[in-house]
Image (cartoon, coloured by chain):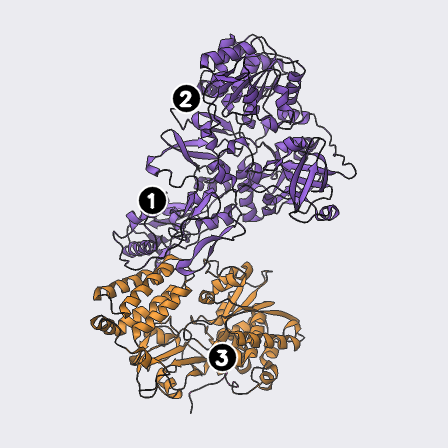
Amino acid sequence: MTPEQALLETQTAVEMITVVIDGFEVTVPKGTLVIRAAEKLGIQIPRFCDHPLLEPAGACRQCLVDIEINGRAFPKPQASCTIPVENNMIVKTQLTSPVAEKAQAGIMEFLLINHPLDCPVCDKGGECPLQNQAMSNGRPESRFEGVKRTFEKPVAISSQVLLDRERCVLCARCTRFSEQIAGDPFITLNERGALQQVGIYEEDPFESYYSGNTVQICPVGALTGTSYRFRARPFDLVSVDSACEHCASGCAMRTDIRRGKTLRRLAGDDASVNEEWNCDKGRWAFKYLTSRERVTSPMIRGEDGELHEASWPEAIAFAAKGLKGKRAGVLVGGRATVEDAYGYSKFARVALGTNDIDFRARPYSEEETAFLSSVALGLKTTYKDIDKADQVVLLGFEPEEESPIVFLRIYKQFRKRALTVISDAPVASRGSVKLNAKSISDIKTISGLTAKSVILVGERLAEKAGALSSAVDLAEKSGAKLAWIPRRAGERGALAAGAIATLLPGGRPVSEASARVDVAAAWSVDSLPTNPGRSTTEILHALTVKNLDAVVVGGVDPLDISNSALSQLLNSFVVSLEITHSSVTAVADVVLPVAAVIEKSGSFQDWQGSTRTFDKAITDSLSRSDVRILSMIADEMGTPINLPTVAATAREIAALGNWDGKKIAFEKTSEAKPVIAEGKLHLTSWRLLLDLGTLQDGEANLAGTARKASARISKSRAEKLGVNEGEFLSISSDLGSLKLPVEISEMADDQIWVPRNSIDSQVIANLGFVSGQVTVVKA
Amino acid sequence: MSKLTPVLSANWDEKDSFTIEGYKRNGGYNAVAKALTMEPDAVIAMIKDSGLRGRGGAGFPTGSKWGFIPQGDNKEHYLVVNADESEPGTCKDMPLLLANPHVLIEGIIIGSYAIRANHAFIYLRGEVVHVFRRVQQAIEDAYKAGLLGKNIGGKGFDLELTLHAGAGAYICGEETALLDSLEGFRGQPRLRPPFPAIAGLYAKPTVVNNVESIASVPAIINNGVEWFQAMGTEKSKGFTLYSLSGHVNNPGQFEAPLGITLRELLELAGGVRTGHKLKFWTPGGSSTPMFTDEHLDIPLDYEGVSAAGSMLGTKALQIFDETTCVIRATLRWCEFYKHESCGKCTPCREGTWWLVQMLQDLEDGKGTEADLTKLLDLCDNIAGRSFCALADGAVAPIISSLKYFRDEYLEHQRNGGCPFDPVASTIFKTVGA
């Protein structure tokens, strides 16, 4: 969908206006800028500061055209990026007006007098709007014989973005993006005249989660990504459309490959999802692909207790032997694609004959299982509902940290029309501050929602007993739209693929005989297991007490679940399908290397439930998708699942379709407030966007902009504890402790917040839980 | 009979002219009392009828500007006085505020009442600290006298007046840049529309007026439309301050009806520096194209100056005699514009950077006749292409100096340098002066 179509969809009865540009008529919605109307005719007016998603600036003056309205001509050429079309308007661009053509050539000449013309060593050379438009709309040769302005180059405005002030044409796209789209005005224009420059406040570097977009929209080589600088020429790159594997926002991506290696990733265009933006994690966190820890060959644990490289047939046979006829479960991590999750789901039911499968490598609850089994897949809320919402409620969900594009969409409406945002977070995140979110502590106190309101529920709401039920209740009573936004890219797809004990693919309840018959017929098997399956912690417990013998683990970090999860794997047969070596591969009996997103095709379901397909970017990769490996193991076990390729899997999923039968009713749970013992504080946590997540491995420049961990407590609590801002606190549970500097915040006195998985603050490893009672003292 | 019509400057020679007592003694604040008994719309109509036009340079009718403010819109309205006088050569508002700050305050009260603003601002050039102190004292005295604050004159009209010191940027004299600066941002011109009358200061309907325009209001209220219209020319009514500076025997501010000529003003100012003759002059500050001795009899009103190819501007008449190198003067001005370009738009930012280098070369006698063509072409690529009028001002002296003194440019090239003795044009030069 183009931005114009998106605009049309959100408006009803748009007034249309017809203008004549270079002798051709074009009809566009009222409010369209002349430069956009010209684009519709295929007339490209050169521009730098203009960007369709930013407010007009009229700063570069490159897009000057001649305009007359009702027979009256403007005395001077006008910037076509600032003037909306009007009836009876006649526009003459550089193609038909010598005045416009000369004006544009003049501006281009001015832009180049202080430009270093270092294209041969510039990252942008070859894909540079300045270079291209200087060729198309500039003078062949400069008449400038004077002295150019010079600056030190480059200066780091953050660890990941470098600024070359000599190349900058001061179009203010980057500063406008930061202010208008991201709400992070950490860069501004400083100084004046030709010495004007983009700058940061020295004590406040450009630590925006969206900073990479400024590099992408910079029309010259002024802003470059540290990780990509001097790495490639654009004409050596092969670009492939892709989807992002980092969260459930569903960003379209572009992956640029040179000789089998990913050099960079860019935000792709999708007006209905990420528009033209993405977050820095999506852009820069791909070094895990080339990590030294990458599993490159199948490995089998020998009798010496060490892992040894093995051939594929050997490893497959070894895995099959260890699983065949055994009581085994399946743990799937959030990185799985829809096809891979379907593979795990089918593998569990057909090859292992069990419903012991769970995609939730994280804290969850029985209530959540019920919610996912009966409510989640039926939710149809989309980005468009956010665009039109009268209120947005965030429950157990920090959009900027956990689904950054959802944040951008909410922020867009907040900026445009002061959209009301309500959050149940105990303390305001920076995202909440930017949205001026109203804080509530009890979901039951929310009132005034309408059918146009949107309730966004995060996976963390499951950590509060009864909260999911209250959210469903709220939606039912108010008519508000409900959405479930898991943090990871694979979760919604895994749920749809039945990688959970209670559901078969397509949302078919395991408990429904007709659903089982359906699937069994499609899979050409006699029957499907009927036993109530185990969930993640139940599977781990069963392994410990020997009720299960073996487990297949695909992309799970045990420390995302609990600090004992790893040890619970120790005495069973573990088949690990992994991208890089991890704590699981260290204890696995057989390790099977799998492809990362860039090396395979597949799809994710974003939080809207939309399918985001992607192709192999690295076409000659030898790595295989999880589903193909599972299919080989199943073959070897004699219980084939017949999923030899991703494409075949996708076809089977499509053919199977969704369940249209009876749904399990959602049994609500009543809320139970956590009891806080005297002298203790209640700890809550969430993950920051940039943290110790394994998919961010190996990208130090990205990690350099991660927010520093701190423990947030109220002012009066800090006074009681005798600590000042920045001094250290010791936070301890029965299982361990953390030491973090204090950040005094507006919050309840009995609450403390720490980041969940950041440097110095890994709460599951350090405290043993993600929320609960802790003892806090001055360190 | 003298051609002067001292109104604003009538009492400048009284030693307490700047005090509230001095101002009141000469009838000050009578106009407020009168205006507050009128309907606000009647005040606007009266200013409209008088034909008062903006004295800051553009000459836009003041009453019409007031009339653009939407009434009954339940929004705050603001009156902002542009006292950021910083055009080279312009020196009317600072002397006025130094000698008679209360006339501005009185005009502000009337203007705010007319447009229904309850908060007015004076954006004052910050470098002129003595004027700042004087205006500050005047505001304090006006508050004490019940002329500002709540229920002014017992008529139920409230007005707060805030004095703000600019931080030394010429661009902040541009009204939208001024508003940005007043809001605490960097001063750069805003995209229009929306115009300040619809969304100005804090996005509320705002009138931005020059000091002299507002200061002229009390006299019109006191003396009536006919009195005001009796002065000036057909389309340029009233009196105004002409500031003569440079090579003139008796420089200063001369308050006269619009339409007076430089020849007449020079007579009042004791003529061009003795022993010298007029070479070129600016009618309204450095950004208005220069004139020569051919233009001595042009009526100095909006239409007259415009018809002769320049602009009335701020009526800052800078007089240069034959000892002055026109390229050198133009270079100095251009350096000013380069320094003051805000950097927002390309032609102004890059163009002034380039022009200064070219002019320096031309002054140094480097370059060829082809460079003059190039220089004019660059000016053509700047004028009318920029975001605001600053760049138009920057190229005005270049284009006009080339128009009248092309041969002097060529003489520099033939001579291999500037043929003028720079000391000869200074006031401390005694020989020949």
Residue drawn 40% across and 78% down?
B234
Residue at the bottom extreme, as displayed = B1
* Nearer-N-terminus badge (1/2): 1
Chain corresponding to orange in the figure: B
1 vs 2, front mark: 1
Magenta-drawn stretch contains A730: no
Q: Circle 3 sits on which residue?
A: B95
Asked if residue B235 lies left or right of residue A564, the reply is: left
Helix, strand or loop for disc 3:
helix
* Distance in Å between CA atoms under marks 1 and 2: 34 Å
Which amino acid type is marked by label 3? Pro
Which amino acid type is marked by label 1? Val
* Number of other residues with Cα within 10 Å of mark 3, as a class: few under 14, some 14 to 19, many 20 or more: some
Where are the magenta residues, as a range? Answer: B1-12
Chain name for mark 1: A
Hey, which quadrant is residue A564 in on the image? top right
Helix, strand or loop for disc 2:
loop
Hey, which quadrant is residue B249 in on the image? bottom left
Q: Which mark is residue A622?
A: 2
Chain corresponding to purple in the figure: A
Chain name for mark 2: A
